[in-house]
Structure formats: C-alpha cells, structure tokens
C-alpha cells in the first residue's frame, strides 16, 4: 500500500474485497474442508458421567462426634489417587478388556496413563460447597464407558468407607494404647503416693490436727503423772520418817549393853545381840538406814584415804558385821504391827513411784515422738503436694483419654454400621446417545470463523504489500506530480 494514512470509504473497502475476492474464498474453503474432513474422519468418543452425593452423618454430631474430621475435598483427592493408581486401573482394564487395539503398540504403563487421561473427576472446591462430585469416563464404546463410569463410582464409595473405617479404627487403637500407658502410670503414681503415706504415716499434713490434739492430751497426762509422782514421793518420805521414828526407840536402849541380856537363854545368843546393839549404838536406825549411812561414811573416807588406812579398814569391818547380823538386827522391830503396815505401805508406794516413773518416761517418749511428727509435717506437706499434683495431672490425663477412647469407639461403631458420612450415587451413568467427541457443530462453527479470519488476514497482507496505483492520490504521493485529470474506467454494456 502506497498511502498507509489514507482514509478509506465504504466503496473503497468493497473495491478491495472485489479485488481480493479469491484470496479470501480460497483459505476459507480450505479451512472449512479440512475441518469437515476432521469431523468426519476422527474417531467417535463417548462420555459417561456419574453424579455422587456426599451424604452427611445420619446420627447428630451432638450425640456422636466422628473421628474423621478431614474435609471432603482433601479426602476425595486421596481417594482419587488410590482409585487411579496403577494397580486399580490395571484391574479395571483387565476386567472390561479395555484398549485392545492400543495394547498391541503401547506398553502397560502407557495404557494406564491413557486411561488416566480418559477419567475425569470433578471435585468440589472450597468456593463450591455443593456436597457432590462427578466421575466421568471417555471411550469409543458407549456401553463400555457407562459400565466403567459406574465401576469407578463404586470404587470411590468403597474406598471412602474403607478410609473412614481405617481412620476410625486407627484412632480407637491409638487412644486405647495411650489409655493403657496412662493407666499404668496412674497406678504407679497411686502406688508411690500410698508408699509415701505408709512410710511417713503420722507425719502427713492431714494428720497434723490429730497429732496436735494427741500431743495436748499427752502433755496433760504427763502433768498429771508428774503431780502424782511428786505426791507419791512425798508420801514415801513421810512413811520413811514414820519408820525411822519407830526404829529409833528400839535401837536407843542398845547403849545400855547388858540390860537386855535377860531376854536370851544362852551365851551365844547374848554375844550376837551384843554385836547388833554395838552397831546400832553407833548410830540408830534400821538395817537399811545403817547400811546407807556406813556406805556414805566409807565413800567419804575413800575420798581422803587409801583402802589400807585404819579408818577405812575399820569402816569396812563395821559394814561386814552389819551384813553378817542383818536378820537378827531388825527382828524385834519387824514384830511391831505398825512397822509392818508402814513397811508394806512403803513397798507399795515405791512400786507406785516406779510405775509412775515408767509411765512418765513412756509419755515423754510419746510426746517427743509426736513433736517430731509435727516438726516434720511441713516437709511432708511439700513432698505430698508435689506427689498429689503429679497424680492429679496424670488422673486428669487418664480421664480425658478414657472419654476420648469411648467417643472413638462410638465413632468406630458408627462407621462400621455405615451411619457416618457416605458417598451415594444419585445419578448413575447412562449409555450416551451421541458421541462426546468430536463436536461437529462446534468444529464447523470454529472452522467458519477461522476460514473467514484467515482469508481476510491474507487479503489484508496482500493489500499492504501491493505497490500499484489505484487512484490519483497514490500517483501524487509516489511520483510527486500533480494529477490534473483522471479517466474513469469504461465498462462495456452487454447488449
């Protein structure tokens, strides 16, 4: 085109179309012919589709909570991968004798890949929560594609039930194992708490109040025993004084020496009496009092002198004489009834004092024992707090796992009875009445527009490349010469 900036009129456009008519018609005819040949000669493919509804759980979730919580689209992706695996597709190919011609020139992997391309699974997206999906299969035989489409839908349903049941069973098994471990740990914690309580029984925090009460009672009892002991000791001193008062009048006449000789019948007894009265005359009192006094005097002498000193030897002789005449010494005193009574009272009082001292020692030991318990209670309280805290935590974990395990068992029973979320075919595949591919009207319509577009494009390209003169403006622009006049084309009229 010599003048690209030229503004064309409608007549000029029509002139261009007339001039480039064959360049438009020939590409259009070729494109239409090629499309028609393709539509006629291409193999016919049929498509069968199955519509599957995602049915919700039949039992309300308020009563039974399902353990399968994954979204439908995620689970469908997993199921689709399982159904379209090589193993599953090879079974379907063998079962329905698919791709008999292709098997002669293609390998098994290529056949499986070809079938994967012919399977279309339209899954619901996050924006399209319709609760259903479709499964389609494309093939050259309408009956076969219908059967395969229904077979694929049944595989989806079976695989969904299998996955849900496996997931529910796996959840139940996992929680059961966790529950067993938690129960073992809980039993171990209970045994530890029981062992600790048994080991420190009496020092536990819950026994503090009872220990304090018992300690108060024992302190009161100890006070009463002390008072009774003091009273018994005072009574013993009083009885001993009375005995001394009784003994002194008997021993006092012993200083006369021979005044008592008329009481004995022979010389030997008189000699024994003289020896007793001689010892008694040195210091009055009973055998016990004399013996105690001689012991004290002997100890005093030993602190001053050795055992070979005459005074020490003389004191030892006195003690030996006293021990030798023990029975004879108190014979007269013991015949007095008042003396015997006081002696018995003294013995009873001594026994009472001994019992009270034993009771006081026992009560003191018990008081010390309960005081130690009360002192150890804070430490035991800290230990028990740690043990109880760990025990309560483990108990709460066990109770939580027990509840979850029971809920998982219910969910597993729900899946086994097929009361959970399921896939249900609501529109099974039907035998297609016309082929899915090729779509002849669509091909012809596309080829029509493609032919026109190609012809017009060829005419436009040729027009742009044309350097011939078609009007006066082209001459003036190309040659730079002013055109004075133009002779129109003379057309011959047919007679």
Image (spheres, helix red, strand yellow):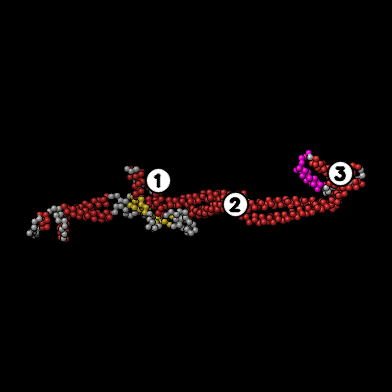
Q: Secondary structure at mark 1?
A: helix
Which of the pair 344/284 is nearer the observer? Answer: 284
- Magenta run includes residue 305: yes
In the rendered image, residue 52, in percent from the top left (x then y), is placed at 40, 55
First-in-chain label (1 vs 3): 1
Q: Which residue is mark 3?
A: 275
Q: Residues within 10 Å of mark 2 (few under 14, many from 20)?
A: some
Q: Residues within 10 Å of mark 3 (few under 14, many from 20)?
A: some
Q: Secondary structure at mark 2?
A: helix
First-in-chain label (3 vs 2): 3
Separation of residues labelled 1 and 3 (CA atoms):
132 Å
Separation of residues labelled 3 and 2 (CA atoms):
72 Å
- Determine whether 233 is above or below 109 in the image: below
In magenta, the rendered stretch is: 287-308
Q: Which residue is mark 1?
A: 87
Which of the two marks, 2 or 1, is nearer to us in this view?
Answer: 2
- In the rendered image, is residue 3 in sight? yes
Q: Which residue is mark 2?
A: 380
């Amino acid at each position: 085109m010599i003048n690209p900036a030229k503004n064309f009129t409608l007549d000029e456009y029509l002139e261009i179309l007339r001039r480039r008519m064959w360049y438009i018609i020939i590409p259009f005819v070729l494109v239409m012919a090629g499309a028609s040949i393709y539509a006629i000669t291409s193999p016919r493919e049929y498509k069968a589709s199955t519509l599957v509804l995602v049915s919700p759980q039949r039992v309300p979730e308020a009563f039974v909570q399902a353990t399968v919580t994954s979204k439908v689209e995620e689970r469908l992706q997993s199921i689709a991968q399982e159904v379209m695996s090589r193993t599953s597709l090879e079974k379907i190919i063998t079962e329905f004798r698919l791709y008999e011609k292709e098997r002669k020139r293609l390998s098994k992997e290529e056949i499986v890949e070809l079938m994967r391309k012919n399977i279309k699974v339209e899954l619901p997206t996050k924006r399209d929560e319709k609760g259903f999906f479709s499964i389609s299969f494309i093939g050259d035989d309408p009956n076969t594609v219908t059967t395969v489409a229904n077979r694929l839908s049944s595989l989806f349903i079976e695989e969904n039930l299998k996955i849900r049941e496996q997931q529910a069973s796996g959840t139940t098994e996992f929680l059961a194992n966790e529950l067993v471990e938690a129960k073992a740990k809980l039993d171990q914690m209970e045994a530890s708490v029981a062992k600790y309580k048994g080991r420190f029984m009496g020092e536990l925090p819950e026994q503090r109040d009872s220990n304090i009460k018992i300690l108060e009672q024992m302190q009161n009892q100890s006070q009463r025993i002390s008072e009774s002991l003091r009273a018994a000791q005072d009574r013993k001193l009083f009885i001993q004084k009375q005995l001394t008062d009784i003994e002194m009048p008997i021993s006092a006449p012993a200083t006369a020496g021979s005044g008592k000789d008329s009481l004995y019948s022979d010389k030997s007894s008189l000699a024994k009496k003289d020896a007793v009265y001689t010892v008694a005359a040195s210091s009055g009192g009973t055998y016990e009092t004399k013996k105690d006094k001689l012991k004290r005097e002997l100890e005093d002498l030993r602190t001053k002198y050795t055992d070979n000193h005459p005074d020490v030897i003389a004191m030892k002789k006195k003690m030996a004489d006293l021990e030798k005449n023990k029975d004879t010494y108190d014979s007269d005193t013991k015949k007095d009834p008042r003396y015997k009574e006081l002696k018995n009272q003294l013995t009873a009082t001594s026994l009472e004092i001994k019992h009270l001292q034993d009771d006081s020692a026992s009560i003191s030991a018990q008081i010390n024992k309960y005081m130690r318990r009360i002192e150890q209670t804070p430490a035991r309280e800290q230990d028990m707090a740690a043990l109880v805290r760990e025990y309560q935590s483990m108990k709460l974990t066990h109770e939580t796992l027990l509840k979850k395990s029971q809920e998982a068992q219910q969910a597993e029973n729900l899946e086994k009875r097929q009361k959970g979320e399921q896939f249900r075919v609501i529109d099974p595949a039907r035998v297609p009445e016309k082929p899915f591919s090729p779509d002849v009207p669509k091909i012809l319509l596309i080829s029509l527009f493609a032919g026109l577009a190609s012809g017009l494009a060829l005419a436009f390209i040729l027009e742009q490349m044309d350097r011939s003169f078609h009007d006066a403006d082209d001459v003036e622009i190309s040659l730079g010469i002013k055109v004075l006049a133009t002779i129109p084309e003379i057309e011959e009229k047919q007679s």
